[in-house]
Image: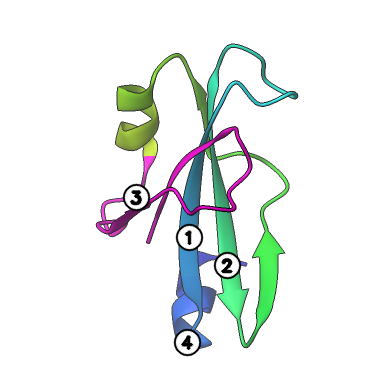
Amino acid sequence: MSTNDSIAFGALELWTIYKDPSDYPGRYLVRRFVSVKGFLVVDDEPLAVVEDLAAARLALPPYATHNFGRMVDDQPHIVETWA
């Protein structure tokens, strides 16, 4: 699903930054999630796999401007989520 498709369907794109996930130990990972009418679609490939949090934030699309931080029940590897 492309960004234009997401907008056309009124979907919400979320970008989650992970630190030291099991599939990329020692790295930061940025992954896109799209929420469409109560369903969550996850991209198969990460947007970025980088060395630090600053680089992960730079990999976010320019329209991802709101940082939700962490939620109480987030997985330990989640650093923050953006929309």
To which residue does mark 3 refer? 61
Q: Residue at x 30, y 25 (%)?
A: 54
| Separation of residues labelled 1 and 2 (CA atoms) | 6 Å
| Separation of residues labelled 3 and 2 (CA atoms) | 14 Å
Q: Position of residue 72 (x, y in %)?
A: 51, 52
To which residue does mark 4 refer? 10
Between 18 and 75, the one nearer to me in the picture: 75
Q: Secondary structure at mark 1?
A: strand
What's the residue type where badge 1 is placed? Answer: Leu
Circle number at residue 14? 1
**Relative to 16, residue 13 above or below:** below
| Separation of residues labelled 1 and 3 (CA atoms) | 11 Å
| Lower sequence index among marks 1 and 3 | 1
Residue with the most extreme front position:
72
| Lower sequence index among marks 3 and 4 | 4
Q: Secondary structure at mark 4?
A: loop
To which residue does mark 2 refer? 34
Q: Which range is magenta?
A: 60-83
User: Dividing the image into 4 quarters, which one contains the C terminus?
Assistant: bottom left
Count of all numbered marks drawn on residues in the image: 4
Q: Does the CB distance between marks 1 and 3 fall below 8 Å? A: no
Q: Does the CB distance between marks 4 and 2 fall below 8 Å? A: no
Q: Is residue 81 magenta?
A: yes
For the residue carrying disc 3, how many other residues have a C-alpha within 10 Å: few (<14), some (14-19), or many (20+)? few
| Lower sequence index among marks 3 and 2 | 2
What's the residue type where badge 4 is placed? Answer: Gly
* Majority secondary structure in the magenta region: loop
